[in-house]
């Protein structure tokens, strides 16, 4: 019987296992394949890590997310299908109405962002930025793009569409919330392809997003319902509910102590041999890599050093996620919302604060009033001189930075009843300018070196959880095709 191996047990690898399994079950029994997932860390889920904490003093319980904490329904078609397949609909929870209230630090003050286009036009600075974009013509944008070599940085693109003040004061902060990266290095084409397509079709990004082509995919009933009710969701037990459900469903096909030490490719289109740290070897007619680019580079170095070099050219940044719990509702009424982000222009030593208990109150399990929030630190250290190196800086110093941020900008002076820090090393890949070309090079080289190895995951095809689940689906489809 033919088989498919999956490298990596984060959300991409787990989802690939599910999509491949679903595809296998749809085929005749005589053509079905065995599936096997290898994960080295002893646990599945990757950066998704939902943990229930109990305070020693109060014996109260609450959920802390050590990584991603919510999903957006607008790009969650595959994710919500996965939710339905796993029968997690009753565990799904929608963000509160406060989640639509977003804040941003501007000139050292946490300010509310406009919640609609009408509100944006009422702000003089934003109104001028929006008119700057609307006046742009397609011909002018085409000419500018040619001088930039076809792949603009986010900074170049946003400055020409909205001007320097809006780019530095608002847009850079929003990008911080996704990539924790430097907009002078990140590729617009790879990070926000829809914006680039809007410019190519209409010049103005706003006109392009309004009048451009829309997806023809029909929303499921669940997706329509989630969109209608706010569009941001999680689960009662956190995002870890997805990875835990996948772990239970496919436990017999998951090896959680399976560190892959080597890949061996047969000449032509022969099977791939996966060698593990315990000395065992396993042959598969197709292998899906859901590993970070640098880990895949380690495995491919003996086979093709140039391919390994290209994979290592995809940079990653480190993040520290600092979770706090406070007794009672301590968020000032005027600051109740999703949280606030900090643009690099502010030169603060933290990236932003998510107010988890306001967005998902159902994830406090004690029945008592509590405030849960998360301070994010780290990111691209080239953004400004105050970005801490969260790997080398002592945790005590980082905790002090996080506590000062909470005290100064949210007015919380009391001591927390629970604190946890998670340093996520090489957490977020950075799609710097040239990423799309580099990815094409990698894919083409891989077709020649290891045609039965399929790429997937955040290193290549989008950093969000939704992106990972979708790229896993495509990879599963490709692996099934290879093993027919």
Image: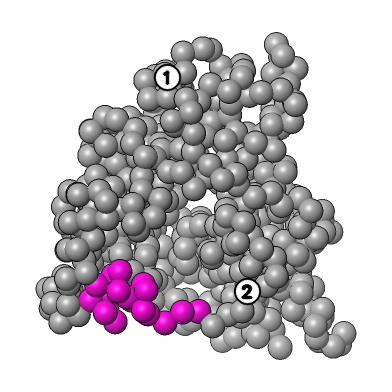
Which residue is labeled 1 in the image? 411
Query: What stretch of residues is rendered in magenta?
Result: 197-215
Residue at 37 percent of width and 74 percent of height: 210
* Crowd around label 1: few <14 · some 14–19 · many ≥20 (10 Å): some
Q: Which mark is residue 133?
A: none
Residue 4 percent location from the top left of the image: 71, 73
Q: Secondary structure at mark 2?
A: loop
| Residue 232 shown left or right of residue 436 in the figure | right
- Between residue 74 and residue 135, name the one nearer to us: 135
Secondary structure, mark 1, is loop
| Residue at the farthest right position | 29
Give how far apart the Cα atoms at labels 2 and 1 are. 42 Å
**Vertical comparison of 214 with 355: above or below:** below
Q: Quadrant of the N terminus?
A: bottom right
Circle 2 is placed at which residue position?
A: 219
Residue 139 in view in this figure: yes
- In this rendering, position of residue 74 left or right of residue 135: right
Magenta-drawn stretch contains 213:
yes
Q: At x 38% / y 25%, what residue is drawn?
A: 409
Q: Position of residue 227 (x, y in %)?
A: 59, 62
- Please provide percent x and percent y for residue 25: 82, 78
* 407 versus 217 height, above or below: above
Q: Residue at x 49, y 41 (%)?
A: 338
Q: Quadrant of the C terminus?
A: bottom right
Q: Nearer the viewer, residue 451 or 88?
A: 88
Residue 216, by quadrant, is: bottom right
Q: What is the chief secondary structure element of the magenta stretch?
A: helix
403 with respect to 18 (left or right): left
10 Å neighbourhood of mark 2: few (<14), some, or many (≥20)? some
At which x and y percent is residue 481?
65, 85
């Amino acid at each position: 019987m033919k088989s498919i191996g999956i490298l990596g047990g984060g959300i991409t690898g787990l989802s690939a296992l599910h999509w491949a399994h679903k595809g296998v079950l749809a085929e005749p029994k005589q053509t079905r394949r065995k599936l096997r997932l290898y994960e080295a860390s002893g646990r599945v889920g990757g950066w998704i890590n939902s943990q229930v904490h109990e305070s020693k003093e109060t014996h109260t319980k609450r959920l802390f997310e050590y990584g991603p904490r919510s999903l957006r329904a607008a790009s969650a078609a595959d994710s919500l299908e996965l939710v339905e397949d796993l029968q997690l609909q009753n565990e799904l929870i929608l963000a509160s109405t406060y989640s639509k209230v977003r804040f941003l630090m501007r000139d050292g003050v946490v300010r509310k962002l406009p919640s609609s286009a009408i509100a944006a036009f009422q702000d003089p600075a934003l109104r001028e930025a929006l008119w700057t974009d609307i006046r742009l013509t397609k011909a002018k944008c085409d000419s500018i793009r040619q001088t930039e070599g076809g792949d603009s940085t986010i900074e170049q693109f946003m400055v020409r569409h909205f001007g320097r003040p809006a780019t530095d004061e608002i847009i850079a902060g929003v990008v911080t919330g996704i990539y924790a990266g430097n907009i002078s290095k990140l590729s617009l084409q790879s990070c926000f392809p829809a914006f680039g397509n809007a410019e190519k079709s209409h010049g103005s990004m706003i006109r392009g997003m309004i009048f451009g082509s829309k997806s023809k995919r029909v929303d499921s009933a669940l997706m329509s319902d989630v969109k209608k009710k706010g569009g941001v969701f999680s689960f009662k037990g956190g995002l870890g509910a997805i990875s835990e459900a996948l772990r239970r469903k496919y436990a017999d096909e998951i090896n959680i102590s399976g560190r892959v030490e080597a890949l061996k490719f047969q000449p032509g289109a022969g099977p791939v041999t996966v060698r593990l740290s315990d000395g065992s070897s396993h042959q598969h007619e197709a292998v899906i890599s859901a590993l970070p680019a640098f880990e895949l580079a380690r495995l491919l170095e003996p086979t093709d050093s140039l391919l390994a070099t290209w994979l290592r050219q995809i940079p990653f940044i480190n993040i520290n996620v600092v979770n706090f719990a406070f007794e009672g509702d301590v968020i000032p009424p005027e600051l109740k919302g999703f949280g606030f982000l900090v643009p690099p222009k502010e030169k603060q030593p933290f990236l932003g604060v998510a107010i988890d208990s306001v967005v998902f109150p159902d994830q406090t399990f004690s029945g008592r009033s509590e405030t849960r929030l998360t301070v994010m630190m780290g990111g691209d250290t080239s953004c400004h001189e105050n970005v801490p190196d969260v790997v080398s800086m002592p945790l005590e110093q980082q905790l002090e930075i996080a506590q000062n941020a909470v005290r100064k900008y949210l007015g919380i002076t009391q001591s927390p009843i629970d604190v946890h820090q998670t340093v996520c090393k090489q957490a977020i890949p950075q799609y710097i300018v040239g990423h799309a070309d580099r990815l094409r090079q990698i894919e083409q080289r891989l077709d020649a070196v290891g045609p039965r190895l399929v790429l997937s995951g955040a290193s290549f095809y989008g950093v969000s959880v939704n992106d990972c689940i979708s790229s896993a689906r495509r990879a599963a489809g490709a692996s099934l095709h290879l093993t027919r």
